[in-house]
Image (tube, grey):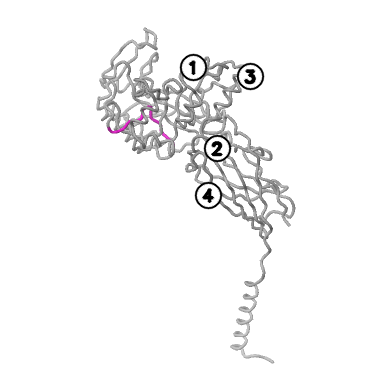
């Protein structure tokens, strides 16, 4: 029977709907039973990124590390009120990155024993300089302290910080910045001439400039300060981290008169926001040089404070250190490696659960922090599945590592589309890719780390039907 055109169109439309309904209600591939992976624990390495001991740039190559420190003078970087020469900075960052490390730097205006760091254009403009013999510098090279209240110098500092942030904030070659610029060695003091140090007004200008210029790269300050501090501008409510440059020497409170000068004493006086700063911003510093010759010996140092306790109570992530650049016995080296690993985060994969439905792999991962501080950088956690050809899909697990405080655990999920992989065995890996291509990979505190790919933890194998 031949249907009229209008009836034929209606018939075809109904047939299409019926077929569509059939397709929509077709049974899906059955899900497999969950497969649980529980990789064994094993301590992470001493040179995990953004933590550990920090030698000066180019030194310490006989001890594992992922960060290196360098000083630069403002004079080498600034040629005029709005003129900048970034070549010395680029050379420092590139040379450190070539060794697989990230940089920490400090810019100085005065450095005992070295020529002034005040730019020549400011000297020619008449910025007042005070020369005086410093106990840690040769008599032939006096310290030269500028007049920090000079309007020309203050304007130059603000211009420089703004330009520095515009060029380098978030640069993957950078790990951390210590604020520097003010005081001897950029350490925010002019001891014993405290009267020559920058006023709280000038300090506030510098802090405001750093806070405006750096939203990604952490900036660390030498001295915590609350609103009642008579020397330092308040910083406890700001976003900066801190660095203790007399670590394990005057870090702990001991109940004596000098507690006000200890790092933890200063944190306490600055208030609860400063005491808890490590929750959101890193703590760094420098092991006191007097401790370098003896710290890793069996009996330790006669002077100084308990290193492990200092680490626990400050939640320090990194420490400048030259003790590991010298010759160490095997036992001394082991003690130094243990100490380096104790700093900062230690991330362990506790469990991973997979459910395969057709070619869709649902993955749930549980991660814990066994360290003493968070991992502060916003690096992504990724899962990767690959077959015999060594290629395959990846998916991001939405962890916020910065919020994973010590002794806390988090679980996140993701789905991997395996449609392009052939039937057969596949491997499931998890990793945190380093944004610096030459950077040393972040390794989990698990035994199967780097088993199949450098920088990746192998969770296990699956069979695709």
Mark 1 touches mark 2? (CB < 8 Å): no
Q: What element carries label 4?
A: loop
Q: Which of 434 and 153 is in front in this view?
A: 434
The image position of residue 281, as x and y in percent, is: 43, 36
Q: Which of marks 1 and 4 is nearer the N terminus?
A: 1
Q: Residue at 57% across / 34% down in the picture? A: 438
Q: Which of marks 3 and 1 is nearer the N terminus?
A: 1
Q: Which of marks 1 and 2 is nearer the N terminus?
A: 1
Q: Nearer the viewer, mark 3 or mark 2?
A: 2
Q: Is mark 1 on a helix, strand or loop?
A: helix
Q: Are there few (<14), some (14-19), or many (20+) residues within 10 Å of tag 1?
A: many
Q: Which mark is residue 398?
A: 4
Alpha carbon separation for disc pair 2 and 4: 20 Å
Q: Is residue 127 above or below residue 367?
A: above
Q: In this view, does 447 lie above or below 181?
A: below
**Residue annotated with mark 3:** 330
Mark 1 touches mark 4? (CB < 8 Å): no
Alpha carbon separation for disc pair 3 and 1: 19 Å
Image quarter (top left, top right, bottom left or bottom right) of the C terminus:
bottom right
Residue 186's image quarter?
A: top left
Q: Which mark is residue 370?
A: 2
Q: Give the range drawn in magenta.
A: 217-227
């Amino acid at each position: 029977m031949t249907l009229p055109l209008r009836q034929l169109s209606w018939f075809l439309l109904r047939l299409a709907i019926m077929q569509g309904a059939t397709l929509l209600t077709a049974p899906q591939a059955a899900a497999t039973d969950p497969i649980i992976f529980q990789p064994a624990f094993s301590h992470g390495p001493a040179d995990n990124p953004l933590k550990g001991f920090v030698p000066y740039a180019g030194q310490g190559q006989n001890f594992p590390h992922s960060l290196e420190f360098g000083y630069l003078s403002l004079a080498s970087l600034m040629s005029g009120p709005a003129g900048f020469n970034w070549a010395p900075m680029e050379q420092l960052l590139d040379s450190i990155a070539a060794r697989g490390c990230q940089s920490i730097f400090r810019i100085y205006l005065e450095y005992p024993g070295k020529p002034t760091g005040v730019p020549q254009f400011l000297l020619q403009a008449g910025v007042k300089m005070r020369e005086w013999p410093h106990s840690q510098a040769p008599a032939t090279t006096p310290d030269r302290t500028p007049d920090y209240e000079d309007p020309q110098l203050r304007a130059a500092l603000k211009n420089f910080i703004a330009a520095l942030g515009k060029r380098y904030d978030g640069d993957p070659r950078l790990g951390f910045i210590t604020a520097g610029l003010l005081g001897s060695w950029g350490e925010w003091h002019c001891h014993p001439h405290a009267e020559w140090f920058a006023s709280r007004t000038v300090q506030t200008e510098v802090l405001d400039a750093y806070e405006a210029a750096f939203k990604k790269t952490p900036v660390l300050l030498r001295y915590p300060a609350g609103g009642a501090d008579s020397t330092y501008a308040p910083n406890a409510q700001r976003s900066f981290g801190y660095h203790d440059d007399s670590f394990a020497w005057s870090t702990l409170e001991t109940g004596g008169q000098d507690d006000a000068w200890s790092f933890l004493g200063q944190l306490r006086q600055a208030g609860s926001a400063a005491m808890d700063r490590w929750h959101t911003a890193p703590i760094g510093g420098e092991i006191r040089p007097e401790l370098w010759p003896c710290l890793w010996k069996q009996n330790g140092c006669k002077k100084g404070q308990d290193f492990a306790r200092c680490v626990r109570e400050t939640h320090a992530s990194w420490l400048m250190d030259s003790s590991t650049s010298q010759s160490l016995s095997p036992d001394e080296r082991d003690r130094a490696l243990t100490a380096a690993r104790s700093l900062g985060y230690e991330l362990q994969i506790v469990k991973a659960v997979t459910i395969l439905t057709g070619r869709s792999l649902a993955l749930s991962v549980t991660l814990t922090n066994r360290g003493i501080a968070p991992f502060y950088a916003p690096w992504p956690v990724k899962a990767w599945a690959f077959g015999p050809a060594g290629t395959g899909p990846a998916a991001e697990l939405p962890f916020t590592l910065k919020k994973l405080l010590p002794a806390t655990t988090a679980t996140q999920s993701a789905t991997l589309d395996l449609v392009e992989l052939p039937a057969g065995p596949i491997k499931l890996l998890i990793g945190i890719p380093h944004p610096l291509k030459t950077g040393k990979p972040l390794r989990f505190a698990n035994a199967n780390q780097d088993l199949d790919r450098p920088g990746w933890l192998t969770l296990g194998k699956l069979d695709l039907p």
